[in-house]
Each structure stands twice: as structure tokens, then as C-alpha cells.
Image: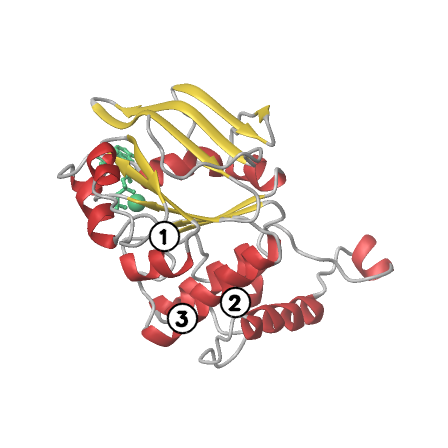
């Protein structure tokens, strides 16, 4: 496959020929992917192109039928989302995995509850609720989500955008190797979207690679270092915001243009 974006470093995440079927539906048809250190990789594609299926393999939510996944050049298999988390891969799923009846702080620390220091924690297994609430408030503040009224508000009482913010805050707080965001701004207002985009850039600048799935081309072109175009269950192209336009990407997404045609259309600026 031709890729116009070449990177010589070793990928942190790599997929080779992933296949995932659901009965007769082929969600992934031999899909490749590479995520390199220090980059934001956008994954774009039409509805049903297999974007969520692809990242769910790395999140441990799907087990591919065949193909290989590598983390830091080692072949991995994830049988659960917990196993992927353990490997440092934190995902915000398109369908948010938040627990509506729990409050913001409880959601942030779900499955990672911190116990009180001393005998209260070790013997009586008391949770350090105060510490977790303070930490949760700090993470939301870092994300610039000032619209949440109280950290003890249950998540079911939050707006869609606020829920999204909680999920993104959780991923940013706990991802140690890679953060995957599947349509993180779809439910967000303009201001909140800008905050999440800024957070993505900050994460990258702190050395945390991010995979961002999005339909929002301006957002993709604003933050992505490289753009993986998924089409019909496989990777159709990898381009960069410097070498291709939004129109090129949309044309490759829909099959109106092949990557070879898009490359031929690249005309160097006159005089260079
Ligand atoms: N759990 C499932 N059971 C059956 N079919 C599925 C399942 N998950 C995905 N599919 C199918 O696999 C294909 C790829 O779906 P996927 O969710 O990966 O697409 P997507 O690129 O994320 O789309 P969107 O942009 O709409 O989120 C679709 O045809 C979808 O219907
Ligand atoms: Mg999807």
C-alpha cells in the first residue's frame, strides 16, 4: 500500500492484517495501523468503515479473528478491556462506558478505587473518598470543565457533553502508554470541543501518543500529525495535513479518489 506519510521510528501500536467479522458482516477486512511515539494519529472514514472495530481490538473489547497486534514490537492478545488497560492503553469508547448511577469521582476511579491510608484502608477496606474527590476535581479542572456543579453529582444528571468530559478526564488521568478517543467531541459544544482538542495536544506534547477517531475534518486537520483513512474495513491511505487537503481526505474516504490519484494531484508550489 502506498503511504505518503513515512515514519522511520518504531511504532508503539501496530496492527497487521486484522480481520473481524460479525456473522456475515465484515467489520475489518485485513486492516493495518501504526501509531508512532509522540504523535496524534487521526482515524477517519465513513460510517461503518471499521474505525471503532479497529480500535476496539486495541482496547480489548474485540478479539480479532485473525491478524496481529503489536505493542512496542511485541505481539499481544487482549481478552478484556482490563488487559488492555494493564498494558497502558486507555480508551474512551464512542458509546460512553460510564456508570450513570455513580458520581463523577466514583466514575473516574471505577475499578481503581483508592483506599484510606493506615488501618482503615488495609483492615476495614475504607475508600479514600475525600482524596478521590479532590483528584477528580483536579482532573476536571485541568480539562477546563467548569460547568460541572459538583463532583458528587451522579453522572446520569450530567449533560451528554459533561459525561464525555468525565470519560476523557478518566482516560487522560490513567492512560500510561496510549490514549484512544472515539469521537470525543461529537456531543460537545464549541468551547468544550476546543478544550478537548487542547488536551489532546497537551497529551501529545507530554509524550503521550493519541489515536483520535473523528468525523470533524477541521478538528482532525488542527490536531493530527498523520491521518489514517479507513475504508471498507481496511486502511485506504495515510496522509498528513501538510500534504493533503480536507477534500482529498473526504475523496479517499468515499472512494472517489485513490491515494495514488491524490498523490498525483500534489503539485509543488510554483517557484520551488
Ligand atoms: N457488535 C457488532 N455486531 C455486529 N456488527 C457489528 C458490530 N460492531 C460493528 N459491526 C458492524 O461492523 C461494521 C463496522 O462498524 P464500526 O462500528 O467499526 O464502524 P465505524 O467506522 O466506527 O462507523 P461510525 O463512523 O458510524 O462510528 C459495520 O457494518 C457495523 O454494523
Ligand atoms: Mg464508530
Quadrant location, the N terminus: top left
**Residue 75 location, x and y as percent?**
56, 23
Mark 3, secondary structure of its residue:
helix
> How far apart are the alpha carbons under marks 1 and 3?
21 Å
**Residue 100 location, x and y as percent?**
43, 61
Q: Answer with left or right where residue 130 lies relative to residue 223.
A: right
Mark 2, secondary structure of its residue:
helix
* In front: label 1 or label 2: 1
* In front: label 1 or label 3: 1
The quarter of the picture where residue 130 lies is bottom right
Q: Which residue is at a point 22% across and 47% down the rendered structure image? A: 248
> Label 2 near label 1: C-beta < 8 Å?
no
Q: Is residue 86 visible in this depiction of the protein?
A: yes
List the residue tagged with mark 3. 194
Residue 242's mark? Answer: 1
Q: Answer with left or right where residue 13 lies relative to residue 227.
A: right
> How far apart are the alpha carbons under marks 1 and 2?
39 Å
Q: Is residue 123 visible in this depiction of the protein?
A: no
Toward the viewer: 229 or 115? 229
Toward the viewer: 76 or 234? 234
Q: Residues within 10 Å of mark 3 (few under 14, many from 20)?
A: some
> How far apart are the alpha carbons under marks 3 and 2?
21 Å
Taking the view exactly as shown, the residue that stands out farthest to the top is 66
List the residue tagged with mark 2. 104
State which tag comes first along the sequence, 1 or 3: 3
State which tag comes first along the sequence, 3 or 2: 2
**Residue 32 location, x and y as percent?**
39, 28
Q: Which residue is at a point 34% across and 68% down the rendered structure image? A: 188
Amino acid at each position: 500500500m502506498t503511504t505518503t506519510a513515512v515514519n522511520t521510528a518504531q511504532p508503539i501500536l501496530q496492527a497487521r492484517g486484522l480481520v473481524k467479522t460479525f456473522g456475515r458482516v465484515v467489520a475489518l477486512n485485513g486492516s493495518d495501523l501504526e501509531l508512532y511515539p509522540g504523535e496524534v494519529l487521526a482515524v477517519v472514514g465513513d460510517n461503518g468503515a471499521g474505525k471503532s472495530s479497529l480500535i476496539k481490538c486495541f482496547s480489548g473489547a474485540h478479539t480479532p479473528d485473525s491478524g496481529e497486534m503489536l505493542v512496542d514490537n511485541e505481539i499481544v492478545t487482549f481478552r478484556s478491556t482490563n488487559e488492555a488497560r494493564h498494558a497502558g492503553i486507555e480508551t474512551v469508547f464512542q458509546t460512553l462506558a460510564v456508570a450513570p448511577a455513580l458520581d463523577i469521582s466514583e466514575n473516574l476511579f471505577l475499578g481503581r478505587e483508592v483506599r484510606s491510608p493506615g488501618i482503615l484502608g488495609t483492615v476495614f477496606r475504607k475508600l479514600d473518598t475525600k482524596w478521590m474527590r479532590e483528584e477528580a476535581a483536579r482532573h476536571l479542572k485541568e480539562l477546563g470543565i467548569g460547568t460541572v456543579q459538583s463532583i458528587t453529582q451522579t453522572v446520569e444528571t450530567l449533560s451528554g457533553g459533561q459525561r464525555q468530559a468525565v470519560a476523557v478526564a478518566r482516560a487522560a488521568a490513567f492512560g500510561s502508554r496510549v490514549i484512544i478517543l472515539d469521537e470525543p467531541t461529537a456531543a460537545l459544544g464549541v468551547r468544550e470541543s476546543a478544550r478537548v482538542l487542547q488536551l489532546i495536544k497537551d497529551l501529545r506534547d507530554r509524550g503521550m501518543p493519541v489515536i483520535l477517531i473523528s468525523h470533524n475534518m477541521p478538528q482532525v486537520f488542527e490536531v493530527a500529525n498523520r491521518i489514517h483513512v479507513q475504508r471498507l474495513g481496511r486502511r485506504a491511505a495515510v496522509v498528513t495535513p501538510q500534504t493533503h487537503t480536507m477534500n482529498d481526505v473526504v475523496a479517499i474516504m468515499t472512494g472517489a479518489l485513490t491515494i495514488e490519484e491524490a498523490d498525483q494531484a500534489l503539485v509543488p508550489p510554483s517557484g520551488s
